[in-house]
Image (tube, rainbow, N blue to C red):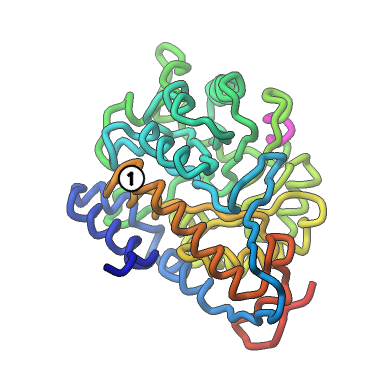
Amino acid sequence: MARESLPELLARHEAAAAAVLPLPIFDFIAGGGGEEISMREASAAWRAFRLRPRVLSNVSTVDTSTSVCGVHLSAPVMVAPTAYHAVAHPEAEVETARGVNAAAGLMVVATRANAELEQIVLALDSPWWFQVYVMRDRDITASLVQRATRLGATALVLTGDTPAISRRRHSASLPPMTTEQYLGNAAAYVKPGADIAVDTNMDPSITFEIIQWLRDISGLPVLVKGVLRADDAIACVDAGAAGVIVSNHGGRQLDRVVSTAAALAEVADAVGARSEVLVDGGIRTGIDVLVALALGARAVLVGRPVCWALAAEGARGVQLLLEMLRDEFIEAMTLAGAASVAAIDRSLVVSPSGGGGLSG
């Protein structure tokens, strides 16, 4: 029997998730902001690039390893922070962590995780990062960050593109859940008598100064997620960020924003020599990973495919997804004549406009 391909795996996982999840929950994971234009464009934007492979390059051995913020990765593929895994699996982020651990990956644990941080960490032997929403009650955020730091998080990922939650598919931003499920790990830090709807909401007043505040209370490197412009990337790094993640929130926030595939090179050219540059949004194949690294990313993150894998097959599905992405990336590197991650550069890609090899 022929081995299942990655596109077949992705399609199977999504179909299985659609079969087992109630429609509001499936829509919560699948849906995008507004008319979902940005969400639909994400994967196609990566596929618009063309490759200029090298020949006679000795790819008898291919090394996919790299490092991000001092963390060794066996392959430049990470698990993006996504909220509320309990809607996809009864053991929530703990089950996700088991799959990530089995694949020797790196998981970015979300502020809105349902499972207790302590239980998630127990399922991880490998390093992990913590994603941060800065809430209106700053003490809640500080307590969460310091808890994650004590538990061994090695970096913070500040989400910068969510001053408010956009309207999404069928006007349903969140699936039905209890207050305790919604608050997750933040529940322990809500003050008595607080207005939960206000105090735990994202603070729309934060500026670049928040980067230094997070560094001060944690002692950890901070990466800013949601960057699509060179000037914002420069401002983040100038304010103390160790890196930026080129992201449009999976097309779930402002609709009609530029794709991450289109924004990546500009951001990488602006700050790649000074900081880490990562990217998410529509990454679905090993060739997508190759293109992203050629455009200047150090690593990529995947979100929705992990949620579908979790709903379909639990930890085993997550492990299989990450391993198949790695295997496809090995094949792409081999055929492109790149024996190591360091050999992947801008000369390998041709812009969607057909203007030849990109420079810079």
- Residue furthest to the top: 192
Snapshot quadrant of residue 298? bottom right
Residue 212 magenta-drawn? Answer: yes
Amino acid type for the residue under numbered disc 1: Leu
Q: Is residue 130 above or below residue 235?
A: above
**Image x and y of residue 107, in percent:** 51, 40
Secondary structure under the numbered disc 1 in the rendered image:
helix
Residue 129, image x, y percentages: 58, 35
Total label count? 1
Q: Residue 144, relative to residue 246: is it above or below? A: above
Residue 133 in view:
yes
Q: Which residue is under mark 1? A: 310
Query: Can residue 208 be found in the magenta stretch?
Result: no
The span shown in magenta is 210-214
* Percent x, y of residue 246: 61, 56
Q: Is residue 350 visible?
A: no
| Quarter where residue 160 is shown | top right
Which secondary structure type mostly characterizes the magenta part of the structure? helix
Crowding around mark 1 (Cα neighbors within 10 Å: few <14, some 14 to 19, many 20+) is many
Front residue (pair 331, 355): 331
Q: In the displayed structure, would residue 25 be above or below residue 40?
A: above
Q: Residue at left 34%, top 44%?
A: 316
Q: Is 151 placed above or below 154 here? A: above
- Residue at point 35%, 39% (across, down): 85
Q: Quadrant of residue 149?
A: top right
Give coordinates of residue 359: x percent, y percent: 78, 76
